[in-house]
Image (tube, rainbow, N blue to C red):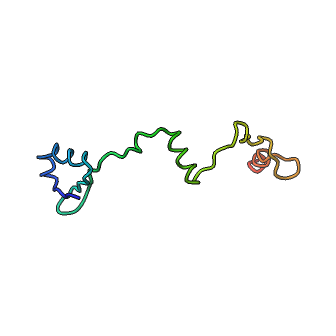
Amino acid sequence: MVTVNVRNLKDRLSEYIGRAEHGEHVVVLRDGQPVARLVPMSPSTDRTADEIIARLAAQGLVLLPEAEGDLEPPDPQVTTRGDLLASDMVAADRR
């Protein structure tokens, strides 16, 4: 890991970008305090959404449906008390 102050970074930006391209991490300092980091681009930034979801599924972090019709939409006519719909109860409460 390399550190560089902002002024030197501005003066030699191409050099530090080249170092990051070759795998180095470059920490940028302002008044001696770290404020930013130049790092090589991760190959994962080029992955598609499908590839990311497949990786998450392989890690067990998400569960994919087994077949096309496995996930059914919820029934819009859900009742909560007797034969009253939730929307009817909300409307009654507003009166």
| 64 with respect to 4 (left or right) | right
Q: Quadrant of residue 27?
A: bottom left
Q: Residue at x 21, y 48 (%)?
A: 19
Report the front residue among 19 and 38: 19
Is the N terminus in the top left, top right, bottom left or bottom right quadrant? bottom left
- Counting from the top left corner in percent of width and height, residue 83 is at 88, 47
Report the front residue among 75 and 66: 66
- Counting from the top left corner in percent of width and height, residue 61 is at 57, 54
Q: Quadrant of residue 14?
A: top left
Q: Residue furthest right?
A: 82
Question: Number of marks in the image?
Answer: 0
Q: Residue at x 53, y 39 (%)?
A: 50
Q: Residue furthest top?
A: 68
- Counting from the top left corner in percent of width and height, residue 6 is at 16, 53
| 13 with respect to 42 (left or right) | left
| 5 with respect to 79 (left or right) | left
| 11 with respect to 71 (left or right) | left
Q: Residue at x 88, y 51 (%)?
A: 82
Q: Is residue 53 above or below residue 1?
A: above
Report the front residue among 66 and 9: 66
Q: Residue at x 51, y 41 (%)?
A: 51
